Amino acid sequence: MKSLNRVLILVFFNIMVATTVILTAGHKATGPTNLSGAEIWRSKNCAACHSIFGLGGHIGPDLTNAYGSKEPDYLDYVLKDGIRKMPNFELSEAERTELIHYLKHINSLGEYPLKSLTAEPFGNYND
Ligand code: HEC
């Protein structure tokens, strides 16, 4: 019974996190060029497998800094054909370009995980 409760709490927490990610992904992308990339991100449910700033699915890698760490050509290749457990979404060239713009925008918001943050007890931190 206890472990069932734990599972239910975990499931509930995951739904909350996924909802937050889906809602905030749309919020962050206010620039006109990023809007449709964010829409594609939501409509294809990328957040089911990918997180941004650690929020979202963990089947695939966190994509906060995918744009900063990988060549755009590589991102386009993955989006076009899929790779291993990453499905092929049959995305058009325009959709792939929008998604890469969106990842570029997300990358510009900051780094994840934070490399400079040293957490201290009692809530103090140095950055
Ligand atoms: C069913 C789960 C799943 C979904 C849904 C999914 N991905 Fe992935 N994705 C993966 C996995 C797993 C990988 C890692 C593949 C590997 O290298 O083995 C990946 C890799 C990637 C990469 C390459 C990241 C890197 O650093 O190499 C990008 C970019 C990417 N996905 C973008 C997307 C986008 C955009 C969407 C929505 C259109 C999406 N993914 C939907 C599972 C998924």
Image: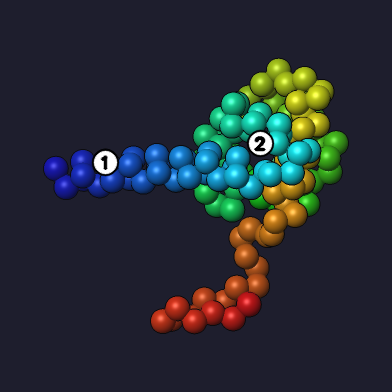
Q: Is residue 91 visible?
A: yes
Mark number for residue 112? none
Q: Is residue 12 left or right of residue 18?
A: left
Of residue 27 and residue 67, the one placed in the foreground of this image is 27
Tell me which amino acid carries mark 1.
Answer: Leu
Left or right of residue 10: residue 116:
right
Where is 60 relative to 117, above or below? Answer: above
- What's under tag 2, amino acid-wise? Ala
Would residue 69 be seen by someone viewing this image from the given angle?
A: no
Residue 4 position, x and y percent, is 21, 41
Which picture quadrant has residue 26? top right
Q: Secondary structure at mark 1?
A: helix
* Left or right of residue 46: residue 1: left
Q: Viewer-proximal residue, 27 or 89?
A: 27
Q: Decide if ligand 1 comes within 8 Å of the CB at mark 2.
A: no
In the shown orientation, is residue 109 left or right of residue 51?
right
The residue depicted at 25 percent of the width and 47 percent of the height is 6
Q: Is residue 77 above or below residue 89?
A: below
In primary-sequence order, the first of circles 1 and 2 is: 1
Q: Residue furthest left?
A: 1
Q: Which mark is residue 38?
A: 2
Task: Indicate whether 45 appears above or below 72.
Answer: above
Q: x, y (%) of residue 117?
A: 60, 73
Instruction: Using a 10 Å C-alpha cutoff, classify the residue at mark 1 as few (fewer than 14 neighbours), some (14 to 19) or many (20 or more).
Output: few
Q: Is mark 1 within 8 Å of ligand 1?
A: no
Name the residue carrying label 1: 8
